[in-house]
Image (cartoon, rainbow, N blue to C red):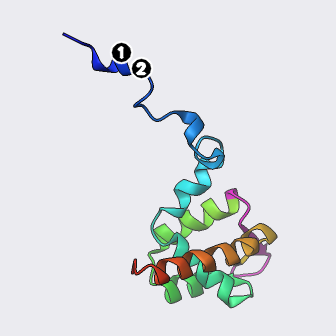
Amino acid sequence: MIDILRALGSFMQPGLEDKPVCLKSASRNFIDLLGRSHVLQMLHFMASQNKPLRFNILKRELSITATTLSRRLEDFVDLGLVIREVFAEVPARVEYSLSKKGKSLGPVLRNLFTWVESNNLE
């Protein structure tokens, strides 16, 4: 019996060299984050507001659970997309705003959304 995999070798197997750098490096965390729930919606909303936003405003406007919102904001802060500012007040006040890196993502997302609309992927 012929071993097809051995006969073909790596010819039929996708190699790592075929993947973009962002899919085989630490940047993969960001790519994975884009596929999680509410991420694109959150980034779009934050970019459209152009001002710091409080947690409850985000929660109300995006119709998202507190747990999911908290996790996504934490992911954004970890990746440097969002700045979390805590004010020493009673009760505590926390505001979230896009960092310079987060703001630079705005045009990329607009292009992505435009591409989806123009290719009838709605």
Q: Residue at x 59, y 35 (%)?
A: 17
Quadrant in which residue 86 is drawn: bottom right
Q: Nearer the viewer, residue 64 or 118?
A: 118
Residue 76, quarter of picture:
bottom right
Q: Badges 2 and 1: C-beta atoms under 8 Å apart?
A: yes
Give the number of callouts: 2
Label 2 is placed on what type of residue?
Gly
Is residue 113 found inside the magenta-colored segment of the image? no
Q: Residue at x 59, y 48 (%)?
A: 28
Residue 103, picture quadrant: bottom right
Q: Is residue 82 left or right of residue 28?
A: right
Badge 2 density bin: few <14, some 14–19, many ≥20, Cα 10 Å? few
Residue 91: say if magenta. yes
Region of the chain picked out in magenta, as a range: 78-92
Q: Residue furthest left?
A: 1
Q: Which residue is mark 1?
A: 6
Q: Which mark is residue 119?
A: none
Q: Which mark is residue 9?
A: 2
Q: CA distance from mark 2 to mark 1?
A: 5 Å
Q: Residue at x 61, y 60 (%)?
A: 75
Query: Which secondary structure lies at badge 1?
Result: helix
